[in-house]
Amino acid sequence: MRDLSTIIKAYDVRGVVPDQFDEDLARDVGAAFVQVVGAMPAAGGPGAVVVGHDMRPSGPDLVAAFRDGVTGQGCDVIDIGLCSTDALYFASGRLGLPGAMFTASHNPAEYNGIKLCRVGAAPVGEDTGLAEIRDIVSRGSVADADVPPGQGHTRDMIADYAAFLRGLVDLSGIRPLRVVVDAGNGMGGYTVPAVLGTAAGLPELPLTIIPLYFDLDGTFPNHEANPIDPETLRDLQAKVRQLDADLGLAFDGDADRCFVVDNTGAVVSPSAITGLIAAQVLADQPGATIIHNLITSRAVPEIITELGGVPERTRVGHSYIKDTMARTGAAFGGEHSGHFYFRDFWRADSGMLAAMNVLAVLGASPPGTTLADLLAGYERYPATGEINTRVPDVPAALHRVRTAFTGRGDMDDLDGLTVSTPDWWFNVRPSNTEPLLRLNAEATDPDTLAALRDEVLSLIRKDDE
């Protein structure tokens, strides 16, 4: 029985091509996916799966193998070709089909993977189908079903995707803005011209887009398409300052995440963007529920509450946020990692929609108002960001932290260990795939934060006794 636990993970399929992830595995995952989501017409399913891929060179061959696995189960494939992950979610929602997006997101060039969803972009995570897919594939090659094979079709949906997003966020009346966009040679270089430009045949917006690295190149010749890493934002920050632009936007490889740089070139925390968009949502939908994960800034639930909304705290991870949004009817959700979720977008995450909301807020502000001005009330507390530490014994390290902080603050175990007081909080949680502990901490002042960070890290990194 093949061990696929390091490839078929908590949220997706991902590995080095071809050593870990090859066409045979893609074919088997395609067949198992059809079985698990009940897509076969004989089972009353929709009878088709929609598939897309990013710009990685290995994508087309892996998609072809996946298609063979799907059609071997009697199910059709609708291939929308090159797309961002949120464009695949759009296709899943618009067509009412389960979907598969071939991408390794921000990972280096040698990786590829698959993000899977059910009808209407509903998540497929470890608890909602991935574990079952892993078990089926682990038992060996998945045989074709005893039914006529499905057919393959192609469909271009970029214009429909662009028009749909323009319908959700109207940018036609904003004041003129100069925007630097770093696509990192990822799918933002394909979707930004379609949505914010005129490539999809849409009316011109009052935006001057200054492109950085828009050529689609899955070898990432300029920098990794991973905007959570501050080093990948240096070129964007420099260009914003050089051109005195109104803001900068950075997308990851599959463009489902967006990071923002303000007019001074400073990186804006995703927590502040969550607060900014939440304020806009609550102005339109008073009293709405807004989702935030447990390692966003404490400012986020404060802002939501101050504006009359209902904050809802969740675990880290898209499947948890989407499930909570479905259960609560939340209008919007944000994560520390630059993922932003919208009820009107099938509760899926979209870096482009997040960017458009920021543009809408800034563009509606009085002339002379800067993004730094607008965000002044949203960046309230100093924070560490995520600090990863490789440890030989994760449970032992967590136990040391728990023991040291017992009685010093409120504790909960929603996702790892969170300890909080009125002056500070921290969360330590294990990685799903590696022997890592991830620390996030926040405090009311830099000195308190530094002392808290150093104490927790010393406990995490202490030799096991």
Image (cartoon, rainbow, N blue to C red):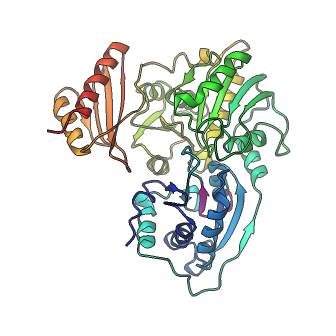
Please name whichever residue, 70 or 54, is drawn nearer the observer in this view of the structure. 54
Residue at 37% x, 14% y: name it. 446
Residue 161 x/y as whole percent: 73, 49
Tell me if residue 445 can be seen.
no
User: Image quarter for residue 384?
Assistant: top left
Quadrant, the C terminus: top left
Residue at 47% x, 25% y: name it. 303
* In this picture, residue 148 sits left or right of residue 170: left
Residue 378 is covered by the magenta coloring: no
Residue 18 x/y as whole percent: 54, 61
From which residue to which does the magenta span run? 94-102
Residue 295 x/y as whole percent: 40, 34
User: What is the residue that sits farthest to the left in this orientation?
Assistant: 465
Residue 138 x/y as whole percent: 42, 71
Please name whichever residue, 218 or 52, is drawn nearer the observer in this view of the structure. 218
Quadrant, the N terminus: bottom left
The answer to whether 2 is drawn above or below residue 178 in the figure is below
Residue at 55% x, 70% y: name it. 24
User: What is the residue that sits farthest to the bottom in this orientation?
Assistant: 146
